[in-house]
Amino acid sequence: MKLFDRVFYYPDRRARTTPAEAGLAFEDVSLRAADGTALHAWLLPSRTAESRGTVLHLHGNAANITGHWPFIGWLPAAGYHVLMLDYRGYGRSEGTPTREETLLDAEAALDYLRARPEVDPRRIFLFGQSIGGAIATVLAARRHGQLAGVIIDSTFTSYREIARYHILRNPVMLLVAWWFPFGVDRTHDPIKYIATINPAPILIMHGKADRIIPWQMSQRLYDAATGPKELWLIEDMDHMEAWELMPEEAGSRFVAFCERALAHFLARSA
């Protein structure tokens, strides 16, 4: 499986920018996964007097947190602490990413947040984008009851299906790699786990002009989800593009969902 996993991850160690360039405070965080792998993350503290909660951000399959922080750089001003994790092999994290081991990384990040003194463990939200959404789906199912809400942005249904989708669209790949999807196993496919996130509320968002992951995959994830769920299909938006082209609406929908999800979580926990 590890050989086939490599095609889904495009890590690099290039340092691009930091939140400091936008005037944001941040803390370097060192973690260790359960297998001992050293990981790097950034913690961005809330900029409001009272925190609304904490967001664990799981980024997409390319680059590292130095290129992904703009997706969540607005959250501290909205009252949220944010932990941005680099999976193993990305940025300053050791190792090589695989499906199972990136889940170990995400679990280490969640455990770290739950132990931070300023973090209310009842107010932790999970935000996964692209392949980070696939990781988030399985993490939320594994950590049943530990998350107030889950936001999944532009994510696929299964590793085999997204591999097949791209090969069928490329004549050269179809000729030389038609066999590849058959070698991709179904371990940790989001479509198999999303129903068991219940009762944590889920927001699924996806641009309907996405050229990397078809929006219909998010529709299928939504259909398979149980419990409180919301679907936002965004006209004319490409892959995760809403955060660049319509940040105010995307941010307001995100925060409004978190408020609804938190109310549901606290009522259920009372």
Image (spheres, grey):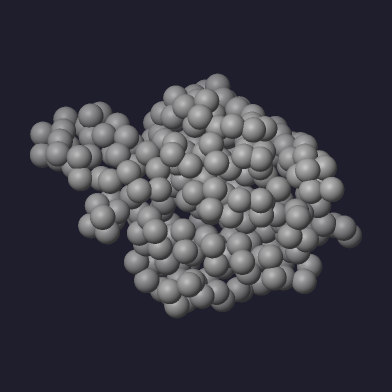
Task: Name the residue rendered at 29%, 53% in the picture.
Answer: 5
Vertical placement of residue 262 versus 27, above or below: above
**Residue 26 in picture, x, y percent from top left:** 68, 68
Q: Name which quarter of the figure residue 3 lies in.
A: bottom left
Vertical placement of residue 16 versus 172, above or below: below
Task: Name the residue rendered at 54%, 62% in the picture.
Answer: 107
Q: Is residue 186 visible?
A: yes
Q: Name which quarter of the figure residue 108 lies in.
A: bottom right
Task: Name the residue rendered at 67%, 58% in the picture.
Answer: 82
Which of 172 and 94 lies nearest the eye of the viewer?
Answer: 94
Which of 144 and 148 lies nearest the eye of the viewer?
Answer: 144
Task: Determine the residue located farthest toward the left in the rendered image.
Answer: 176
**Residue 1 in picture, x, y percent from top left:** 26, 55
Task: Determine the residue located farthest toward the top in the rendered image.
Answer: 235
Q: Describe residue 100's horizontal placement relative to residue 18 as left or right.
A: left
Which of 256 and 21 lies nearest the eye of the viewer?
Answer: 256
Vertical placement of residue 257 versus 114, above or below: above
Which of 224 and 165 lies nearest the eye of the viewer?
Answer: 224
Q: Describe residue 250's horizontal placement relative to residue 209 as left or right.
A: right
**Residue 243 in picture, x, y percent from top left:** 60, 39
Vertical placement of residue 240 versus 112, above or below: above
Number of numbered discs overlaid on the protein picture: 0
Q: Is residue 209 visible?
A: no
Q: Name which quarter of the figure residue 180 lies in.
A: top left
**Residue 95 in picture, x, y percent from top left:** 37, 71
Task: Name the residue rendered at 26%, 34% in the picture.
Answer: 164
